[in-house]
Amino acid sequence: MTVKKPKFLIDRDRELCNDCGVCVRQCANEVHYADEKNKQIKCKPAECVNCQRCVSLCPKGALAVKQAPQEFSGNANWNIDIINAIQAQADSGGILLTGMGCSRPMPSYFDRMMLNASQVTNPSIDPLREPMELRTFLGRKPASLTLEGSQPTELPPQLELEIPIMFSAMSFGAISLNAIKSLAAAAESEHTFYNTGEGGLHKDLFQYGKNTITQVASGRFGVDIDYLNAGSAIEIKIGQGAKPGIGGHLPGEKVGRDVSETRMIPIESDAISPAPHHDIYSIEDLTQLIFSLKEAIEYTKPIFVKIAAVHNVAAIASGIARAGADVIAIDGYRGSTGAAPLRTRDHVGIPIELALAAVDSRLRDEGIRNEVSLVVGGSIRHSADVVKAIALGADAVYIGTAALIALGCHVCQKCYTGKCNWGIATQRPELVKRLNPEAGAERAANLIRAWKHEIKELLGGMGINAIESLRGNRLMLRAVGMTNKELEILGVKAAGE
Amino acid sequence: MVTIDSRGIYYMNLNKQIRQEVKNGADEILLKNVNGQRYIADAIRGNIKFTIEGIPGNDLAAYMDGPEVIVKGNAQDAVANTMNGGTIVINGDAGDTLGYAMRGGEVFIRGNVGYRVGIHMKEYGEQIPTIVVGGKTGDFLGEYMAGGIIVVLGQPDGNEVIGNYCGTGMHGGVMYIRGEIPAHKLGREVQTAELTDKDIEFLEGIISRYKDYFKLQLKDIKCSDFTKLQPQGTRPYGDLYTKY
């Protein structure tokens, strides 16, 4: 039972393969190898994670990876994944560890909402001819302003984004320095922000400060005065969609010298970020941390508080707004991670669409929606997801997985092994250097620009020329195949209504 | 020296005033009649001496990097939260979570401290934070500790010096606790170790500084009576997971 069954098979076209050995050199999992006798390239498919690196780089196009044809008995309930999981746990007694976001085929609410478009009675707008405003300000908006001339005398600090899309928190440790540099440079060129995650700020990244959100989590890695002042905002991480209610353990395999220095922990130790901040047991304690940070930066930057979308998210968000946060970031259950227990990743939390609608409605009902901005993440896959999120009430979105896919990720879900062949979720120098940060920055920036064009097209089609007019405009959404309760929570009408 | 009478001043205004004095180049600030104001010396950097008369509020010296802070009374929770450098001397007791994620500098407490003290302490290279508690501590001392040094003198009698769950999840750093420690008080991830000559030398130095700060004799405290606690390994939860 303990013999590892391959999940994937490598299909090597012997007609095309010339045994050049690129696949051997590219695979950190050591799937491909040259036969000692005849130098022919062979493979051990049991180690294959299907990251598609060898397929993408094979100069002859000779490789394909496919599902291994393992047929179990066909019981739909006790399926191959369940049986394999039980076998793995019977072997080891361990918690099943995985990476990326929930992979269960749960229904998507974004996919069951359709956007509006103008026809005859109101004109659509052509974004190729007419200005289209996507600029977004994140931060507390005061209920009233005192003006001196035309300028307000005092305005709470705001982040200014040219497009309501930011790169979500991914720490140095979880991902490589080159991956972070790619996102940081893309954030700079596209006038938006990337988020350091909780792993501190490598010294090479201070130059991107004005496009940086620094994160403070329960492990407080890399947090000092320079770090707090380095970015344009600070995010307190309470939770994350991939693993609500539990903390993070960055595996020791990924803690080399640089990560150890940045986080101030021993080399090759696990970086432990427990579930709670051990000084936050209440909303009042959260206030204390928020204001310790505000005092530290002299009230010059907005403070984000990031939580996972969970059952009572609306009440929790109300508490966070009242605790003094300027921005609330909510991460849905599909949100991704470098490492999480499988069962937590796949079974804890709620969909971001419902959480967002519930929070936006609650804050409006309480008359405090202006006091915080809302940023949502947790599987924003394309520009239409962005538009739907904003129509539901978000001020901006975070993208993580989509950004990594732009850098080469193929969602093999093995980030925790530290063997990412794309140079993203790894700290091994020979793998990290495969990701050229300049090329990565261009690809991530291209993605943002492509989505920007698409968002403008979608807005124009609705007859809207400013993202501000879409925000919380749920009349632009219609639902297909939802229950009355779901419609009520989302605050949208059924298609045809 | 600058003197600020803190009586009745809201913490935001008091701290604004303090920062202004620091910007003006004050190298010594006396805060009189402090009564619970939070965040004093929060994120202050430089060679400045603060003397606090009264009881400072939570998060005293959070993120602080360099100053010396003398508290002529008790302190509340979260002293030295994520502090990076400098020295804090408390002439009394202090509350919970003192030294949370502390990265450098020193805190000397004359009396007792509360729960979760020194958790997540870190170190790198020469930058090693130190906490010296003259009295006793609550539960969870040094939890998840990744670096740094904690010394507990256990005055006045050296009995029941620490609470339960000491060093749970510890994977770096070292603790020196006066006296024998019953096994049930220790987290699963710590182990006791023999004191080396270097440890004794360190303890002699740090205890003598403690005596100087608080003008105490402490004749019955012997360095050889301390129990040294260190992590069993750097990966306390390395075996917890199965790759899937």
Image: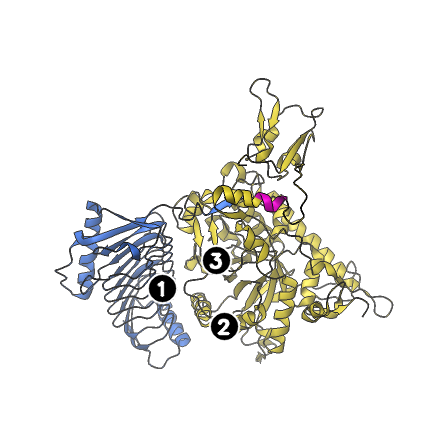
Q: Are marks 1 and 2 in contact (CB under 8 Å)?
A: no
Question: N-terminal of the two: label 3 or label 2?
Answer: 3
Is A482 colored magenta in this rendering?
A: no
**Colour displayed for chain A in the image of the structure:** yellow
Q: Name the element at disc 2.
A: helix
Secondary structure predominantly adopted by residues drawn in magenta: helix
- Residue bearing mark 2: A323
Q: Nearer the viewer, residue B203 or A312?
A: A312
Amino acid under disc 1: Thr
Highlighted range, magenta: A80-84
Instruction: Point out the frontmost of discs 1 and 2.
Output: 1
Give the numbered dot on residue A230. 3
Q: Nearer the viewer, residue A256 or B185?
A: B185
Residue B89 is left or right of residue A207, and the answer is left
- Spatial CA distance of label 3 from label 2 is 24 Å
Chain name for mark 3: A
Horizontal and vertical percent position of residue B111 = 24, 67
Amino acid under disc 2: Ala
Amino acid under disc 3: Ala
Say which chain is blue: B
Quarter containing the C terminus of chain B: top right
Horizontal and vertical percent position of residue A9 = 65, 34
Give the numbered dot on residue A474. none
- Residue bearing mark 1: B97
Crowd class of label 3 (few under 14; some 14 to 19; many from 20; radius 10 Å)? many
